[in-house]
Image (cartoon, rainbow, N blue to C red):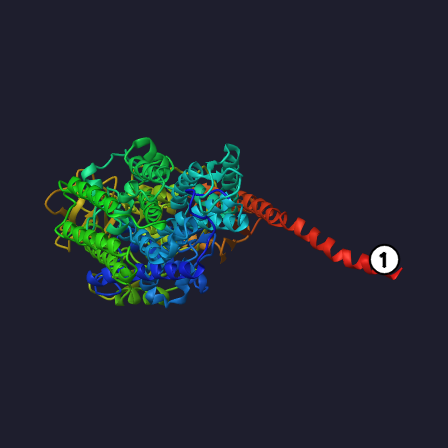
Amino acid sequence: MPNLDNTAPVHISGSRDRGRATTLAALLTLVAVCAGDAVARSFPFGPKTRSVNDLGNQFVPFHAHLWDLLHGRAGGGLLLNWQSGYGTSFLPDLGTYLTSPFSVLVGLFPREDIDLAVHVITVLKMAAAAAAMTWLLFTLHRGNGRWWVAAVLGASYALCGWSVVEASYNPMWLDGLIAFPLLCVVGEWARTRQRAVLGTLIVAVAWAANFYTAYMATLGAALVLVLRLILDERTNDGRDDGAGTRTAMPTPVRDRVRVLLRAAGTTLLGIALATPVLLPVFRGSKHAYPGWTGEFEPAGWADVFARALPATYSFFTPAAFLGTGALLLACALVFHRGVPRRVRWWWTALVVAVAVSMQWGPTHLAWHIFATPNGSPYRQSFVLAGVLVIAAWVCVARAWPGRRALLAGTGLLAVLALGAATSKLVTGWTFPLFALGLAGAVGGLVLATRQKFAVVAALLLTGGLVGQAAATTAYADRQRLGRLDHYPAWGAAHSARADAVAGADNWPGSRTDSGREHLTGNDPMLLGGESGAYYSSHTPAVLTRTMAALGAGWTSRGRNVQSLDNPVTDAVFSVGARVRTAPGGRPEVTRAAVPPLVTVRPEGPEPRYGTSPFRNQELLLGAPVYGDPVGGVCPAGTDVFLWAPDFAGTARLGDGKPVRLTGGLPKRRAPMIPLGTSNGPASRIAFGKQEPRDWSAGCLDRGRLAAAVARLKTSGAVSVEVGDSGLRAELPPGSTGTAVLAAPRIAGWTCDGRPAGRYLGLVAVPLDGKRTTVDCSFRPPGLRAGAAVGGAALVVLAVRAAVPLVPAVRARRRKDAKPSRHIADSGH
């Protein structure tokens, strides 16, 4: 078999050492992360929330919805989510946020401990990444008894800055952290013609868990495999030589090409197995409202060097921190004469190439599927961390680096620290922690050469890593709270709102909205009910544009659609109960008579939305209910609504209580807001420090609204049945015109066997006066094609698994047949 470096056997040996190393790596990771959170007094070790940004806004609510699905309590199923966005596709969200094998662990916790469940899942993913990297290191080289060094390096990888600073609040990314070493192992199996079926399944799980980071991990694993093939050599008789005592010669090119083809085949087949999840995710992204895009700007090298040191934080620089011990070994590799020159120079070149590729525009795009991401532009940093750790293991696995190599490596680290000195990212803790870690690493590696000091050496290296990683975790915990939006962990306020929503439940007779005063962008999934609020990478464009036309607000440039507190839209979307919660007060439920989920509109051409949300609401309702202010004043007894989408400030009606608007297009859009009931001339709209440049007001006549609702109820469905992936409604006999389902017309709806129609952005079905039922079903785009490709891949995998068994079966049959013929012959 081909070797990495002429001397190191590729086969896995020392299973006991490997088991101890993987266990220790996982434990070190758990201790460091939890210690850092405890120092920062972050949940669950203190009162400070850890739910910042997308962690609190997306991941916790999505895991709460998964909990409901696992316990049979969710509104909808795997295909359709009835709770969010007035009905939206769930499979793309599942494939993006929840298909990690770790996600199902959420079902083991009480629902009110959802924040704890997500935290446990997060740290378990980090521990699994440490174990996976340690396993890979033993696969590359058995380490000659240095199992504890492999454990420290495996934990260093899992505790890299990218992991503890960025991925810790984007838990789906951590699946890529696990995937990289596992995919490198799959590459090793391709080299040695081993475990092709298991390798394919690992690829499939990695890509299904999180395709985005799996793509980056696959690129990184491909680079590692190519380098391994470059370094492959054979003995002159064509056999592997683990001892390196015979003359070595390069592995033939054709053999290397065969390895690459095997690896490519395994990867493509694994990806094909994941297509039932991947294709709906890709199609969901295609139909999503466009997010933020920008041009890549490389970070300054001083900042890049600073992020390799402990206790630094930034959102737009690569979080390349590793424990100083791992960095020292990686830097010492090129000077370590105990490692063949080709090996140390090629691995050092790979480290440099990956680091530089993060800073160059074309390769930056290649790492990110050719699109600059919304947010951190260095999401591939974990691959650099992995390559550095592998290089560190190459340095130490065969022989301890001598003092000359350690001195030179220390010099390189000193140059790196000097280059970081001018960075504003450096804190008061950075250099002291770096110096202590470096001293401990050098001392530990010097002592490690003497067996009697092995325990002291291990304590120095592990202690340095845990201390630096815990400090970096604590620093990041505190910085995130000051720089990012944050959301409280589940508490009394959550329970009170959830109880209020549950008490008002009337689904599918009508919807219950958890309230405009939201705790997160996905309150319907977190608290219950059925609302227009929804925040995802897959927020449908039709939902955002329809709700915007009706006066809804948003954040995250349109991907976080907010609930709209308005009686007209509540009537249109059959919101019969709404929870309102004043600051510091108890939630109160307001009920209203609303039409059913399916209503009937008269025959005629479909109307089109205009620029006024007041007129648009009337179009969708089918009746004029708003009047215009006369002289800036609404008639007494009418409800006053203000529309100022780009305004950030306060407004009030007369001497009423000021209401805050939080506009700021295009990132934030203020919703249409109620200001109260007009008392006539005294009820003028007044603003705070400044008046918005563009605003309008509408005067809602409740009597007209009640009459319009009554008409829709009379002609609407007499009964509605809602399932996990569709809806069936019974209509009054002789219904003509258009049946309108109070749900956005997202891609995937079919009604009565045909693609559903559209009525002002909602699902529509033409009626001919003969039918009394409307039967609509939803299938996410890409599911059928994905299932077909996945099924075909499964057949290929089964054949691939069966083919090697055929010769063995034939050989056994021949062996079993020989004694019977012998007996027959002797009998004659």
Asked whether the viewer can see residue 211, the reply is: yes
User: Which of 555 and 448 lies nearest the eye of the viewer?
Assistant: 448
Task: Report the amino acid beneath label 1.
Answer: Asp
Residue 106, above or below 214: below
From the viewer's perspective, is 730 left or right of 425?
right
**Residue 370, percent across and down?**
37, 35
Q: In the rendered view, would you say 306 is above or below 452? A: above
Neighbourhood count class around disc 1 (C-alpha, 10 Å): few under 14, some 14–19, many 20 upward: few
Per the image, label 1 sits on a secondary structure element best described as: helix
* Coordinates of residue 692 in the picture (x, y in percent): 16, 41
Instruction: Please give left or right for residue 645 compared with residue 573 in the image.
Output: left
Is residue 354 left or right of 36 when viewed as pictured?
Answer: right
Residue 292: x, y in percent? 30, 39
What quarter of the picture does the C terminus occupy?
bottom right
Residue in front for this viewpoint, 431 or 662: 431
Residue that badge 1 annotates? 825
Q: Is residue 760 visible?
A: no
User: 487 or 703: which is nearer to us?
Assistant: 487
Residue 823 x/y as whole percent: 82, 61
Q: Residue furthest top?
A: 362
Total residue callouts: 1
Quadrant in which residue 375 is drawn: top left
Judging depth in this view, the residue of 490 and 463 nearest the camera is 463
Residue found at x 34% / y 33%: 363
Farthest left residue in view: 689
